[in-house]
Image (cartoon, rainbow, N blue to C red):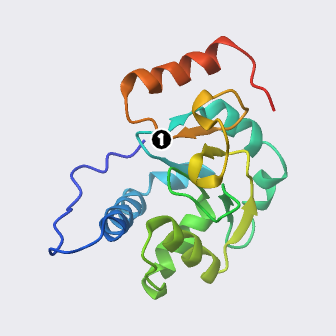
Amino acid sequence: RVDVGNVDVYMAQKVSVENVNLHINKQVWKRILDAGRFRQYQWTVKADPDAVFFPERLRQILEGADQAKAAFGKGLFLNNCGFGLHGPLEVVSNRALEAYGEGSSTCKRPPQEDVYLQQCLVQLGVTQVNHFNLLAEDHCAFKDWEECSSGHVAFHPFKKVEDYEQCLDVVEEGPAVG
């Protein structure tokens, strides 16, 4: 856990929500890099607060072949959606984060934070590994994501506390299907 403190969200008027999110997320990744604690671990995970995230499920995925691949070259990141990386859950190896820290200033600025991160990491030579069992959400065309009944690592978005807690209860009370 890294305390990202207060992130400067001042932006000029008439800026899209996507640009604000990009600005915030770039600052968050910069603070993670500056703090340097990520170097103590093989992986760094950014999860949105409205995503119900189950770290133990992610650990099971990371125990596979990706764990070994993450230690070579410029590392890797996990793509969580068939439409491209989606921001509610971003999983990046420490070598990939090092590459991002060294080269992010050369990356183009697409309009969305998740598109930016994916394109930047690929541009920097980081390996993308598809894991479509990470994130269940409507924007990845996953039906019934809000039921939390699949074996996904995270479910998104839950804007009400009671819905978030219901998802936690479903997963904790029974075995995941698929």
* Residue 58 position (above or below residue 46): above
Front in this rendered view, residue 115 or 41: 115
Left or right of 35 in this view: 13: left
**x, y percentage for residue 139?**
57, 54
**Residue at point 40% right, 40% down?**
49
Quarter of the picture containing the C terminus is: top right
- Quick one: SS at disc 1? loop
Quarter of the picture containing the N terminus is: top left
* Residue 111 position (above or below residue 45): below
Picture quarter containing residue 98?
bottom right
The residue beneath circle 1 is 157
Picture quarter containing residue 72?
bottom right
* Residue 113 position (above or below residue 135): below
Left or right of 79 in this view: 61: right
Q: Amino acid at mark 1?
A: Pro
**x, y percentage for residue 114?**
51, 65
